Amino acid sequence: MNNLETYQNFYFVGIGGIGMSALARYFHASGKKVSGYDKTNTKLTQALMNEGIDIVFDDHIDEKITALQKEDTLVIYTPAIKKLGILDYFNDHQFEVLKRAKVLGLITENTDCIAIAGTHGKTTTSTLVSHLCKEADLPFSCFLGGISENFKSNFLYNGTKYSVVEADEYDRSFLNLSPDWAVITSIDADHLDIYGDKNTIEEGFRQFAALVPEDKQLFVRKGIDIGRSHLTYAVNEEADYYSDNLRMENDTIYFDFHTPEETVKDFAWEIPGIHNVENATAALAILHKLGVDFETLKKAIANFKGIKRRYTKHRYDNGKIYIDDYAHHPTEINAVMSSIRTFYAEKKLLVVFQPHLFSRTRDFADGFAESLSKADELILLDIYPARELQENFEGITSEWLLEKVNLNKKEVSALHEAFNKIKEKEFDILLTVGAGNIDTLYDPICEWMSKY
């Protein structure tokens, strides 16, 4: 294939995906002509169009597509799209067609790449690393799996020396990267439709770890066996880098941060949960190794606002709280629920959960049931299929999962009926959680609760 610099046109098939849109923004910021297709018009595709990127939502070969020349056009696609006439057109006419992961990998070859991997925590950690880089004014670009509340995007361009990327294990995408620095937050079983079993996904992470050239530029949460020498990080236990002395005052969490050489007291931030202090510890470790001073890091941690749909919390005048989160694995749901129960032990909790994928629901049904049983009341939405078909997973339904949940107050609901059901419930805290299109409830809930 040609060098990326030789292409003037970049066409994205599935441009509205969180990873695809970050790449689209990168090439657009680089002065290239960017266009694409997506099935659905969303807030994200609307934002891309507002930025000057041309997007279509019909699978139709129009004159803009036929005007593209294969010599100066690169087509980028997501594996989530299995069959599409537009994609067939590009393949039939011998355009260069590459997966998103391959293109991101090519970008990382020419930068000092900081790659954040893990089945949980990678979006928060990579977004925080990017925020710290920005506050330290390092020359970097970032490609994130969530929308930063600080810079209102999943992409930021502040130079090209460093790249901060979310290293996605799905489809073994992260093995396309060229990481100079890396964090591994967790290697729990997930994506068993790709990996088959827990041992295979762990081996995938070991292969990713092997890509990092220097032992002291690989940071792994203490307790994970990654198969090579590395630095460790932890919370409330000693490691190469660790945080402890956690305490909460109002809505602010304070903690002390330890390096191999020194202790820095009283970091403060407003992102709840011990797991998020763990993510902060990894981010601080990398920025410290990059030479950023602690005064800058303290200020940056204090003004970090988090990521959309990652424990996004609203407190209302009537005392009620609304939390929205992207968690879609039992371990992630447990982390969110534990944080709520730790800080709001006596509050009545209503959970609205949308399972993501039939395969994940099947593989982790008992774990989902155990974590969801910690609610006081549950509205379980229909399973969001994403790339899967119900006909291939006979009997795997929300009704089947609900039977496993140990709660008296529980029910299944279609998404379009959920908002009206929520308005009929009594609760102190409302948690909406899931990775599908449950996010469409967010704006109506916020508007309703502000008038509640």
Image (cartoon, grey):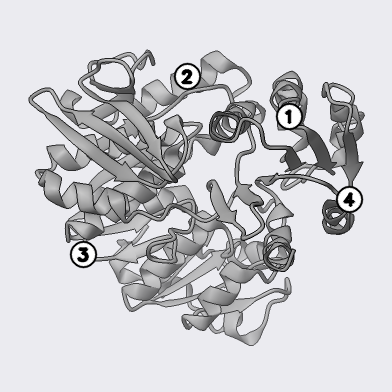
Residue 202 pos. (x, y %)? 47, 19
From the image, state whether disc 3 or disc 1 is nearer to you.
1
136 relative to 146 in the view: left or right:
left
Q: Secondary structure at mark 2?
A: helix
Q: Secondary structure at mark 1?
A: helix
150 relative to 91 in the view: left or right:
left
Assess whether mark 4 and mark 1 are in contact (beta carbons under 8 angstroms): no
From the image, state whether disc 4 or disc 3 is nearer to you.
4
Please, what is the three-letter code of the amino acid marked with disc 4?
A: Ala
Instruction: Name which quarter of the figure residue 335 lies in.
Output: top right
Residue under the point 28% across and 48% down: 301
- Quote the CA–CA distance across marks 2 and 3: 34 Å
Can residue 163 be seen here?
no
Q: Which mark is residue 202?
A: 2
417 relative to 155 in the view: left or right:
right
Q: Nearer the viewer, residue 90 or 114?
A: 114
Residue 15 pos. (x, y %)? 56, 65
- Quote the CA–CA distance across marks 3 and 1: 43 Å
Disc 4: which residue: 414
Residue 26 pos. (x, y %)? 37, 66
Q: Secondary structure at mark 3?
A: loop
Please, what is the three-letter code of the amino acid marked with disc 2?
A: Glu
Disc 3: which residue: 159
Disc 1: which residue: 372
Q: Nearer the viewer, residue 390 or 126?
A: 126
From the image, state whether disc 1 or disc 4 is nearer to you.
1
Q: Earlier in the sequence, mark 1 or mark 4?
A: 1
- Quote the CA–CA distance across marks 4 and 3: 45 Å
Q: Nearer the viewer, residue 258 or 84?
A: 258
Q: Earlier in the sequence, mark 2 or mark 4?
A: 2
